[in-house]
Amino acid sequence: MDWAKVEKSSKTIKTINKLSFGVGIIMVAFSVLILLFSYFWTDYGLILMLTHTRPFLDQLNTLANFGNTHREVLAWTYFLLIAGMFGMQILIFLPKLLARLSAKILFVTAGITTFLFSLAYPFLSYDIFTYLFSAKTVWVYQANPYLTAPESFASTDLWVSFMRNIQFTYPYGAVSLLYSLIPMIIFSGRRFILNFFGLKLMNAIVFYLAGLILFRLGSNKKVFSIWFFNPLLLIELLANSHNDLLMIGLFFLSLFYLRRKEIKKAWAALLASVFTKYVSIIGLPAVFLSEAKRRCFFRILSVGLVVLLGLQTNRPNQAWYYTWIYMFLPLIKLKTSSWGVIYLIGFLLLTHYFSFIRSGFWGGAKLIPNSQLLFYFLVILVVFIELDLWKMAVSKLGLIFKKS
């Protein structure tokens, strides 16, 4: 036995484990900080309802008061947190470092971070309260949320006091409604805390399984940077709890079954995705395409979605809308430099919340001036990189200078 090789191998394993544990500790630390940070923004209506029967939760009132009186400090805290996570995302994607990290340790870290982010208060969105109350409308009031708006119960149900857009009926698909009903059925519809955390923990399971499916579909260890440790996805899909997560997860599941030639299951998963949130219907032709054509189709959809979202004038650049593109991006084998630009776009989108945290109102001055133009510049840059237009432009410039 070559003991020198054994000793070298042992040292390599120790180095890999140390690096992986280091990455894990940093990511878990960010998760804990975001978890704590999120509860500074607990809605006063929710606090009032909870403390009526659980006086010990009055500590939430202290946190909320601190958040409202220290907005400037907390806005910059938010910026530093997302900047730190963005830095880790880039670092983990670097091929040389990624090759030296242990997949097992990273999966454990991903499980912990997923769990912690799922417990965070949805400090930048109220959509989860719509999901929960729509399920309650069915389970408790035996009414149709597609016909009955939450404002109908404003005088009798305290849950309505911390909701937004209560004048509108339920706008999502039946699968999303059924999904939100699960914690209601388990815990009964009148127990808010159990339903709230039940739905959030279900999201954690969906998020983790979606990442595992991506890993199986060929994302390999890049999945940790693309999915598990992606600050845009962690904040929008887990902390803010948008039901886009279920739509994307079911879409991945349909692709997994397609890969295994289980067409009926693929159709079932795809239709479930569509009837969660209807936007995934644009991926329907993928069922009929070969693997190579499917990849090309997903490239077109990725660019097309960005263009369509950019054309909307009523709610431009809502960050969670751009999570839809992650139905396709991890599956089209982009260049490393393209991913770097895409991560920067995600970071830019998250900075749009800075002014809201600082002022408490939407529509304030953005942290980054002309961020809309910067956004489009970065999108065009990705297209240039992927089509090698940059090299073509440099080559033509070289020819022009030679002739002159």
Image: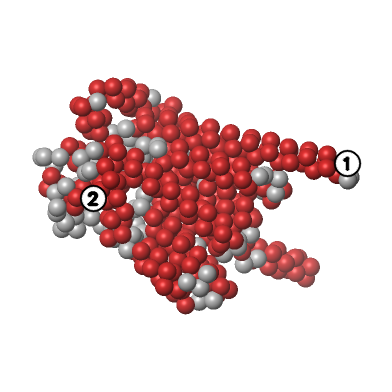
Specify the label residue 135 is tagged with. Answer: 2
Q: Quadrant of residue 195?
A: top left
Q: Is residue 305 left or right of 176 when viewed as pictured?
A: right
Q: Residue at x 51, y 43 (%)?
A: 111
Q: Quadrant of residue 12?
A: top right
Q: Is residue 205 above or below residue 381?
A: above
Image location of residue 146, percent across then percent down: 19, 58
Q: Residue at x 21, y 47 (%)?
A: 136
Identify residue type, mark 1.
Ala
Q: Is residue 131 above or below residue 213?
A: above
* For marks 1 and 2 on the same chain, the one whose residue lies earlier in the sequence: 1
Image location of residue 162, percent across then percent down: 23, 38
- Residue for badge 1: 4
Residue 59 seen: yes
Q: Secondary structure at mark 1?
A: helix
Measured in 3D between alpha carbons, the distance from the residue under mark 1 to the one under mark 2, in whole angstroms, is 63 Å
Q: Residue at x 57, y 45 (%)?
A: 107
Q: Is residue 135 left or right of 13 when viewed as pictured?
A: left
The scheme the figure's colours follow is secondary structure
Q: Is residue 224 above or below residue 63?
A: below
